Image (spheres, grey):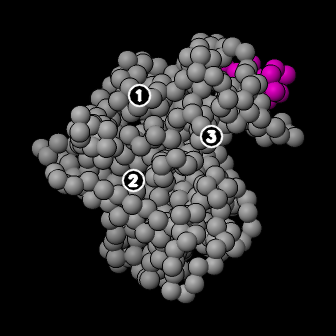
Amino acid sequence: MTTLQEFSKLVKQAEIQFVDFRFTDPKGKWQHLTYQIDSVDKDILTKGIPFDGSSIAGWQEINKSDMLLMPDLSSMCIDPFTPYPTLIISCDVHDPITLKGYHLDPRHTGVLAEQYLIDTKIGDQAFFGPELEFFLFDDVKFHNSEYNSSYSVDSDEHPSNSNKSIESGNLGHRPKQKGGYFPVPPVDSAFDIREEMVSTMKEFGLSPILHHHEVAPAQHEMGFKYNTLVNVADNVQKYKYIVHNVAHSYGKTATFMPKPVYNDNGNGMHVHQSIWKKGKNIFSGNQYAGLSETALYYIGGIIKHAKALNALTNASTNSYKRLVPGFEAPTILAYSERNRSASIRIPCVNSISAKRIEVRFPDSTANPYLAFSAMLVAGIDGILNKIHPGDSDERNLYELSTSELKKQSQVSRSLNVSLDNLDKDRKFLVKSGVFTDSQIDAYISLKQKEVDDVNRRPHPIEFENYYSC
């Protein structure tokens, strides 16, 4: 664990002027408050920082609003974007009376999930490797009122700009629709932006691996090294922060929204997973695709609880505009080696330590702490109850006929359906002690408001279809 002495040493070496204390709200968004360095003393670092929990949607009532932020010094990193040297410290949220972790704090849920794995004696570490896709746009407009609703997104990479008059000249190098995978510059116009993002990731304490253009025009992805559950969820928050701020510095805007562009590929967050015990990967074995029986049971748990998991792994109404056939989004609850049309893929690897599964239906609207924790608990439920996933499916599942699709178990089709499934299939989460009934109730209530926001508002397509009925 990082000590107070190490904190003081870093503050002195980096000439830190501010300390930014960050935590994650139930929706998965980073929040913060900043102290001038002279105000940061031992008590703040060891006894916590009082704050108003009622101001965070889905948390405390006004009559019980006082909460504590407990800094995790092991998470310290220097903010690469601030004009004055600023140290970022991730925090857990504690109850000020009991001093215990707050049951609605997503990071605390991650801590409990890691401990639950140890308590089951199945393993002592769970590793997660998320892959987050995003779009870079040059212009975004949206408006909603009682009498008007509209949005528009634009990128110089969009094929629709091929005949646009541009003052400096239209240079013409653009990917076609669904033609953005791996072209070199100048068709890949954001190469330099991604390189700066990757360099910033390294400064920020992440271990970047690669970056590339994705399938859709203006769509991108960068990879960073896997880690244990809480650490990798922390890294997801850092990754998003980097992408948003580097894009902003280039006069562009980044979004992880699953489906911001109609009729083209959306943004996913594929999540690689494995469990280790005493330094050995227990997902490696002599079963299908080099997996162990334990790994197959883990897959069985994910598939069994997938429709409930969707409420946490695909946490927006927009998520289900991505999870439709025809856009390389995995909708069928099947597993297969190499097969990217299945919702669970077993990557081809050349070492025992790299053996893992990849769950492909999540997206980045998920709160990473909640999503990773829920998948781990579902997988553990599969192991404890020996839930075999059945036979693998080697077919190209994107090409199944309508009649064949009807025979397949699939992910939820809307956030509303996912929330209903989470409500009905919550026992495995609560029984583990990682989640509580009140936490799930609060989450469903928070997300149901988002469903209502969309369902109660007229849509432009409804005018097109029904205005003259």
At x 53% / y 64%, what residue is drawn?
160
> Mark 2 vs mark 3: which is more N-terminal?
2
User: CA gap, disc 1 to disc 2?
Assistant: 21 Å
Q: Is residue 188 magenta?
A: no
Which one is in front in this view, the residue at disc 2 or the one at disc 3? 3
How far from the left and from the top, in percent, is residue 113? 51, 34
Up the image or down, 283 lies above or below 73; here it is: above
Quarter of the image with the N terminus is bottom right
Q: Alpha-carbon neighbours of circle 3 within 10 Å: few (<14), some, or many (≥20)?
A: some
The residue at which mark 2 appears reads as 29
Q: Is residue 274 visible?
A: no
The residue at which mark 3 appears reads as 328
Which circle marks residue 203 in the picture? none
User: CA gap, disc 2 to disc 3?
Assistant: 27 Å
Amino acid bearing label 1: Ser
Amino acid bearing label 3: Glu
Which circle marks residue 418 in the picture? 1
Q: Write down the quadrant of residue 20 in the picture.
A: bottom left
